[in-house]
Amino acid sequence: MNENSKPLSTVRPFQDPCAGDLITPVNSNIAVRSIINLLPMYRQGLSIKSRGLQLGSAFGFVLYGPFTVLGPMRNTEFSTTIGLFSTIGGVTILTTLFFLYGQAGGKFYQPPANPTVPNPPKELFNSKSWTQFQTFFWLGGSLGALVAWFIYSNEFIGKLYQVSLGG
């Protein structure tokens, strides 16, 4: 068998084969790359404050539902308010973990270019930018939880919820 008839591999190294960063049909797919590069963490041209607000508001909005609907006080009239406070508490815990990540080691990890994210944001990974990011993450998370609470506790939305449950 000569070298020209060798089958092409669908998995190959990105740069250094010893680094373990491989080009696969999943991470080099144009659809997957587009979705990942549109996330606020990797989108080009966003400020640090905007990244924090967008990610925080998404977390706050999404976490409100499970805390309200599945929480231990779910069958009381206080479930919506307890869900709001629980979500803000969860976002505060995440922000505290971001703070601890920024304090540990003293030096930030700069993510290298890879097949999925060819241009990772360099401006995010320093002490000043990380502090701004975590501040605006907390603010966005609290506002996202507040918006979710307002929508969920709205009387019209509540009636729609009752109808969807068959009651």
Image (tube, helix red, strand yellow):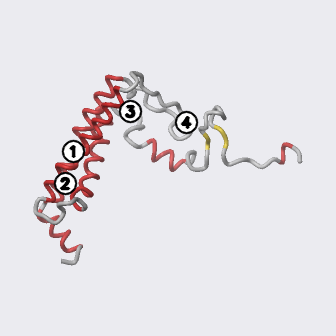
Residue shown at the point (28%, 35%) measured from the top left = 96
Inter-mark Cα distance, 2 to 1: 10 Å
In the image, residue 65 lies at what x, y percent? 25, 57
| Label 1 neighbour load within 10 Å: few <14, some 14-19, many 20+ | some
Q: Which residue is mark 2?
A: 83
Q: Which residue is mark 4?
A: 114
Inter-mark Cα distance, 1 to 3: 31 Å
Of marks 1 and 3, which one's residue comes earlier in the chain? Answer: 3
Residue shown at the point (61%, 46%) measured from the top left = 24
Inter-mark Cα distance, 2 to 3: 34 Å
**Outermost residue toward the bottom in this view:** 166
| Label 4 neighbour load within 10 Å: few <14, some 14-19, many 20+ | some
Q: Amino acid at mark 2?
A: Gly
In the image, residue 148 lies at what x, y percent? 20, 53
Of marks 3 and 4, which one's residue comes earlier in the chain? Answer: 3
Q: Is residue 68 above or below residue 54?
A: below
Inter-mark Cα distance, 2 to 4: 39 Å
| Label 2 neighbour load within 10 Å: few <14, some 14-19, many 20+ | many
Q: Amino acid at mark 3?
A: Gly
Q: Amino acid at mark 1?
A: Gly
Secondary structure beneath label 3: loop
Residue shown at the point (17%, 51%) measured from the top left = 84
In the image, residue 41 lies at what x, y percent? 39, 38
Q: Which residue is mark 1?
A: 89
